Image (spheres, helix red, strand yellow):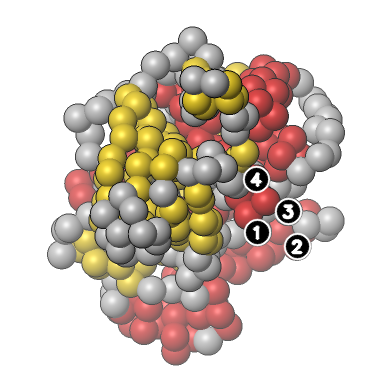
Amino acid sequence: MIRVGITGQAGFVGTFLFNTLGTCSDIERVEFADEYFDDSQKLREFVRSCDAIVHLAAMNRHSDMQVIYDTNIRLVKELIQAMEAEKVTPHVLFSSSTQEERDNLYGASKRDGRKLFEAWAKKNNAKFTGCVIPNVFGPYGRPNYNSVVATFCYKLTHGETPEIQQDGSIKLIYVGDLCKEFIQIIRSGESASPRAIPYGAERKVSELLATFENFKKLYFEQGIIPELPGKFDVQLFNTFCGYIDHKTFFPYRLKLNTDQRGSFVEVVKLDKIGGQISFSTTVPGITRGNHYHTRKIERFAVIKGKAKIELRKVGSSEKLTFELDGSAPAFVDMPVWCTHNITNIGDEDLYTMFWINEFYNPSDPDTFFENV
């Protein structure tokens, strides 16, 4: 087992990496809390417990750029001091940025922090990987802080109007792909600095906004699954859905068409794409599911009987509960990284329709079991 700790574990990338490491049978996670940087003994205990440390803790935004620089350098120095005090040399992976090349103090803090780790590694004959990372995006990031993608998605799903400050071209990496890069480096023991992390796609800011506006028009306003021709498109869509207020958005009410023949309900509209549609019957009192997906897009629609659907984001204790009745057709979608289940709470068999789409790499494991 490789014992891995993450400074900045509670942050956007840190949360994704911590959860992803939880799916790896050869890795043991070492818990970290931000207050360890204010308690030298706790920080020393942390570094002593790790075979590898991914240093993500950093300040990205502040009105005073000098504060950003001083804070980020301080965090690097305190981590080095703790390792030297304990005389340990875990493999350190440092999260730097392509902004190293820019003339700003944030980029300088990343470049200079990487140099400090390089000097420590050389002095102590330790492994160090200085990862130079492009713009990271994904669901649940902080708007107006982590990325322009987070800001666009949040504003479009919360009744605000996004604005383009500068229509440049940016190189992007999905947070899940970044986590895979970190894990590959940890397993291989690769030591390199600088070590460029490859980007997944390059888009102009205006192109990103147009894509998310299309998602809002089709999915958010009409319930239509948009066309998602490639991996990057799926990642953008899953990111967009991560900013929807699921408490108020679901259950999404469907139109019920009734005549003398009976009733007809269109459960899923697909914008130029396909997928798998199926249904199940569940006897009263039985629960199905208790797993989560990292990639698949899935929809549950109750067409007969009464059901309770439960969702919980992995790593969170908050549980969302929705009750659906086939007499008033509705659906609930399963966001990525959300454990979910469905229970028959009625007195008759429950009929549920499912739609799911793999989109890419269907052979790559995507379903992990965990109780809601």
Name the amino acid type tagged 3.
Arg
Of the 4 image quadrants, the one containing the N terminus is: bottom left
Name the amino acid type tagged 1.
Met
Give the secondary structure at mark 2.
helix
According to the picture, the residue beneath numbered tag 3 turns out to be 61
Give the secondary structure at mark 1.
loop
Crowding at label 3, few (<14), some or many (≥20) Cα neighbours within 10 Å?
few
Of the 4 image quadrants, the one containing the C terminus is: bottom left
According to the picture, the residue beneath numbered tag 2 turns out to be 67
Q: For the residues marked 1 and 4, what is the alpha-carbon distance in whole angstroms?
A: 33 Å
Crowding at label 2, few (<14), some or many (≥20) Cα neighbours within 10 Å?
some
Q: Residue at x 28, y 40 (%)?
A: 280
Give the secondary structure at mark 3.
loop
Give the secondary structure at mark 4.
helix
Q: Position of residue 66 (x, y in %)?
A: 77, 58
Q: Position of residue 221 (x, y in %)?
A: 69, 29
CB within 8 Å, label 1 to label 2:
yes
3 or 2: tag closer to the N-terminus? 3
Frontmost residue, 139 versus 101:
139
According to the picture, the residue beneath numbered tag 1 turns out to be 59
